[in-house]
């Protein structure tokens, strides 16, 4: 099974939230939807954290990834 993109996960999460906010979901279904929503939210958070780490690193002249540091004068 192919992993969904961040945007696909976000769309799924928004749909689940709308369903839960409607108040028309039976309790058992609401619990399942809430659990699924929390799993999707964690996946999205993990992807954001991973992207943040990548953005905060730069490729040095020797080809190594190093932490990005701002040098103040």
Image (cartoon, rainbow, N blue to C red):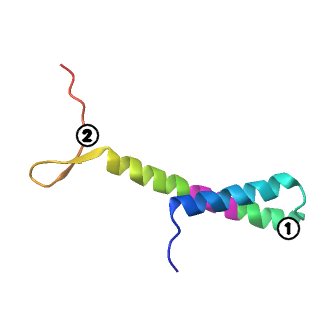
Select label 1 or label 2 by which is in front.
2
Q: Is residue 13 magenta?
A: no
Q: Quadrant of residue 41?
A: bottom right
Where in the figure is residue 64, as x and y percent of width and height? 16, 53
Where in the figure is residue 32, as x and y percent of width and height? 76, 67
| Residue at 59 percent of width and 62 percent of height | 9
Check residue 28 in the rendering and tell me which mark sits there, or answer none: 1
Where in the figure is residue 13, as x and y percent of width and height? 66, 58
Check disc 1 and report its element: helix, strand or loop: helix
Q: Quadrant of the C terminus?
A: top left
Disc with the residue nearer the chain's start (1 vs 2): 1
Crowd band around label 2 with a 10 angstrom C-alpha radius: few (<14), some (14–19), many (20+): some
Over which residues does the magenta segment extend? 36-42
Which residue does the numbered mark 2 point to in the structure image?
68
Taking 1 as reference, is 60 left or right?
Answer: left
* Chief SS of the magenta region: helix
Where in the figure is residue 14, as x and y percent of width and height? 69, 55
| Residue at 10 percent of width and 49 percent of height | 61
Gap in Å between the C-alphas at discs 1 and 2?
47 Å
């Amino acid at each position: 099974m192919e992993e969904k993109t961040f945007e696909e996960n976000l769309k799924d999460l928004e749909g689940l939230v709308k369903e839960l906010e409607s108040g028309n979901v039976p309790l058992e279904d609401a619990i399942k939807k809430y659990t699924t929503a929390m799993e999707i939210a964690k996946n999205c958070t993990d992807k954001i954290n991973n992207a943040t780490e990548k953005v905060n690193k730069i490729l040095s002249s020797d080809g190594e990834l190093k932490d990005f540091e701002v040098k103040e004068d």
